C-alpha cells in the first residue's frame, strides 16, 4: 500500500527505540514511589509543562499514592529540532500555589532555558518550595542550573520523540521514546 503524499511514517522514522513502553512504565512507577515517600504529609501540586509532559504527567500522577493536585503551564523554546532563543509562555497557572509544595513536571531538561522560565514564574506565586521532575535529562552544557530532583532517563544529545515529545507536532502519540532519524529533518 502506498502512503498518501505528505503523510509521514511513524515508527519507520525512528533510527532507534531508546525506551520502550515497559521501561517507561517501570521508570514512572519508580519515580512515583519516591515522590509518594518524599511528599507524605505535604501539600503537593504537580505543575506540568505543555505539551511535551502531558502523558508523563498523566502517568506520574497516577503513580503517586499521596494526595496531590495538578496544573498545567504552557512554555516552549523549540522550533523543529533546534532550540529557539525565545521561550514563549502561553498558558499561566490557575491553582493558588502560595505556601504549597510544587513539583514542576517537564519532558526534557536540555539547556535549561525553558525550565528556568517556568521555575522563575512558579516562584512568583510564593510556594513553600519548588522542585523539578524531568522525564529525560540530556547530557549537555546547561545555560541554567536548576534543582532537578527526579529524572527518569539520562540520554546523550540526540533528538527524541514519542511519549508526548514531538517533531513539528507529530510523533507525540508513540508509546516508546525513540531517536528521530536525521533523514526526517535534514
Ligand atoms: P531547553 O529550554 O532546556 O533547552 O529545552 C527544553 C525543551 O525543548 C523541552 O521542554 C522540550 O520541549 C524541547 N526539547 C529538548 N530536547 C528535545 C528533544 O530531543 N526532542 C523533543 N521533541 N523536544 C526536545
Ligand atoms: Mg517542552
Image (cartoon, rainbow, N blue to C red):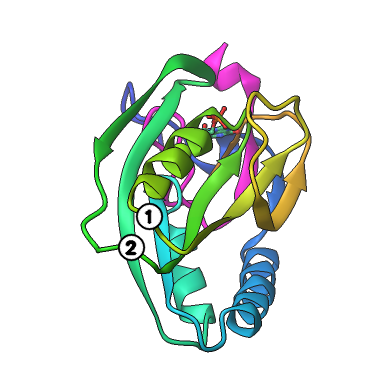
The image position of residue 68, as x and y in percent, is 40, 79
Quarter of the figure with the N terminus: top left
Disc 1 crowd rating (10 Å Cα; few below 14, some 14-19, many 20+) is: some
Q: What element carries label 1?
A: loop
Magenta run includes residue 179: yes
Which residue is at a point 65% across and 84% down the rendered structure image? Answer: 37
Lower sequence index among marks 2 and 1: 2
The image position of residue 92, as x and y in percent, is 24, 45
The image position of residue 79, as x and y in percent, is 42, 20
In the picture, measured across the screen, residue 101 lies left or right of residue 92, that is right
Per the picture, the main secondary structure of the magenta-coloured stretch is: loop
Quarter of the figure with the C terminus: top right
> Is residue 27 visible from the viewing direction of this image?
yes
In the picture, measured across the screen, residue 97 lies left or right of residue 59, that is left
Q: What element carries label 2?
A: loop
Provide the residue designation for mark 1: 126
| Segment tinted magenta in the rendering | 163-186
Disc 2 crowd rating (10 Å Cα; few below 14, some 14-19, many 20+) is: some
Per the model, the C-alpha gap separating discs 2 and 1 is 5 Å
Provide the residue designation for mark 2: 98
In the picture, measured across the screen, residue 29 lies left or right of residue 61, that is right
Q: In this view of the protein, which residue sits in the foreground, 125 or 139?
A: 125
Does residue 29 lie above or below 146 as drawn?
A: below
Q: In this view of the protein, which residue sits in the foreground, 103 or 186?
A: 103
Amino acid at each position: 500500500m502506498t502512503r498518501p503524499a505528505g503523510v509521514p511514517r511513524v515508527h519507520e522514522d525512528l533510527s532507534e527505540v531508546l525506551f520502550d513502553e515497559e521501561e517507561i512504565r517501570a521508570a514512572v512507577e519508580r519515580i512515583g514511589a519516591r515522590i509518594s515517600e518524599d511528599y507524605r504529609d505535604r501539600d503537593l501540586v504537580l505543575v506540568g509543562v505543555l505539551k511535551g509532559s502531558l502523558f508523563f504527567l498523566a502517568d506520574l500522577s497516577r503513580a503517586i499514592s499521596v494526595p496531590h493536585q495538578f496544573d498545567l503551564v504552557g512554555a516552549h523554546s523549540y522550533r523543529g529540532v533546534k532550540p529557539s532563543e525565545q521561550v514563549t509562555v502561553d498558558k499561566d497557572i490557575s491553582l493558588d500555589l502560595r505556601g504549597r509544595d510544587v513539583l514542576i513536571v517537564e519532558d526534557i531538561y536540555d539547556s535549561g532555558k525553558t525550565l528556568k522560565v517556568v521555575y522563575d514564574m512558579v516562584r512568583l506565586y510564593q510556594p513553600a518550595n519548588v522542585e523539578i521532575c524531568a522525564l529525560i535529562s540530556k547530557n549537555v552544557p546547561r545555560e541554567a542550573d536548576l534543582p532537578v530532583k527526579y529524572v527518569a532517563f539520562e540520554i546523550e544529545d540526540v533528538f527524541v520523540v514519542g511519549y508526548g515529545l514531538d517533531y513539528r507536532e507529530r510523533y507525540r502519540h508513540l508509546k516508546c521514546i525513540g531517536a528521530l532519524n536525521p533523514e526526517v529533518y535534514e
